[in-house]
Image (cartoon, rainbow, N blue to C red):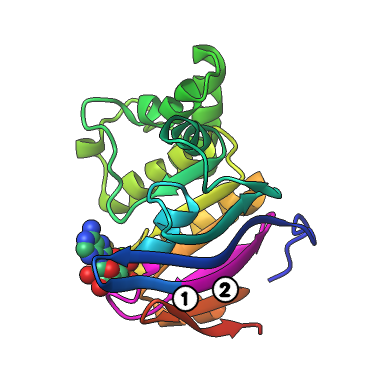
Amino acid sequence: MNNPQRSAEPVLTGRGLVKRYGEQYALAGVDIDVRAGEVVAIVGPSGSGKTSLLHLLAGILRADGGEIRLQGQRIDQLGEKQRSELRRTEFGFVFQSGRLVQELTAEENVALPSLLAGRGRKESVAAGREWLGRLGLAGMEGRRPGELSGGQAQRVAIARALTHQPKVIFADEPTGALDTRTGHETMNALLTAARDSGAAVLIVTHDWELAQALPRMIAIRDGRIATRQPA
Ligand SMILES: Nc1ncnc2c1ncn2[C@@H]1O[C@H](COP(=O)(O)OP(=O)(O)OP(=O)(O)O)[C@@H](O)[C@H]1O
Ligand SMILES: [Mg+2]
């Protein structure tokens, strides 16, 4: 897959990343580079450290060792407040099952990160509506998550991850709760939307077939990188 927005400079880098839980190493020294606009699949058995890696890179968890840089700047040493600011402004998240706010409409859910990132209400709602439209959800802006199918709700979650124009999207098993066909459609929607936005995407998936189809795949085993494709 060619990506015209892919540039040579990494947007996000991890060096020697270590995460421990007591005596156990969830990550035992991982190096990773993600370039702007690039899509990277992360695969590996349950418990191998995939979620830990995403959470470290996104500043949700603190590393016990190593360095993380966003556009060349160290971010792993920032305090909680600054990291949460980074998560709101520079990163987007898609979880296994949407985690949409049930009381809010699709449009309100999608506008939320943009509002939290400090943009005005009108601008946030307009951007949200545009992404909902691009993801095939025009006409459903006023529905609450309970009034959407699983695949539709997940596309709302994708729109929500993109509306504030993040540099990197972290997707942890974004299609894990969907049937195979809906899962593939949703994944295609995510990839197309990310390409349009220029954001880099890190996708954790159990779907080996899908991972193989992506331009880059990193396999993790026991907290270490087992394979990189292309090397
Ligand atoms: N909060 C925690 N406390 C203790 N151990 C943890 C914690 N979170 C994760 N671990 C351990 O760290 C290791 C890596 O976990 P992680 O969640 O990163 O795996 P994963 O690859 O995402 O697995 P899955 O595919 O099941 O989601 C596992 O052995 C797990 O049991
Ligand atoms: Mg996980």
Residue 215 as seen in the image, left or right of residue 55: right
| Label 1 crowd (10 A; few <14 / some 14-19 / many >=20) | few
Disc assigned to residue 166: none
Identify the residue at horizontal 49%, vertical 14% (top origin): 121
Q: Tell me if residue 149 comes above or below residue 66 in the rendering.
A: above
On the question of residue 179 being in view, the answer is no
Give residue 100's quadrant in the image. top left
CA–CA distance in space, label 1 to label 2? 7 Å
The location of residue 176, given as percent across then percent down, is 30, 64
The amino acid marked with disc number 2 is Leu
Give residue 113's quadrant in the image. top left
The location of residue 119, given as percent across then percent down, is 55, 18
Query: Closer to the camera, 224 or 124?
Result: 224
Rendering quadrant holding ligand 1: bottom left
Residue 88 as seen in the image, left or right of residue 141: right
The residue segment tinted magenta is 29-50
The amino acid marked with disc number 1 is Leu
Disc assigned to residue 210: 1
Residue 213 is covered by the magenta coloring = no
The location of residue 201, given as percent across then percent down, is 55, 57
Residue 12 as seen in the image, left or right of residue 88: right
The residue where tag 2 is placed is 214
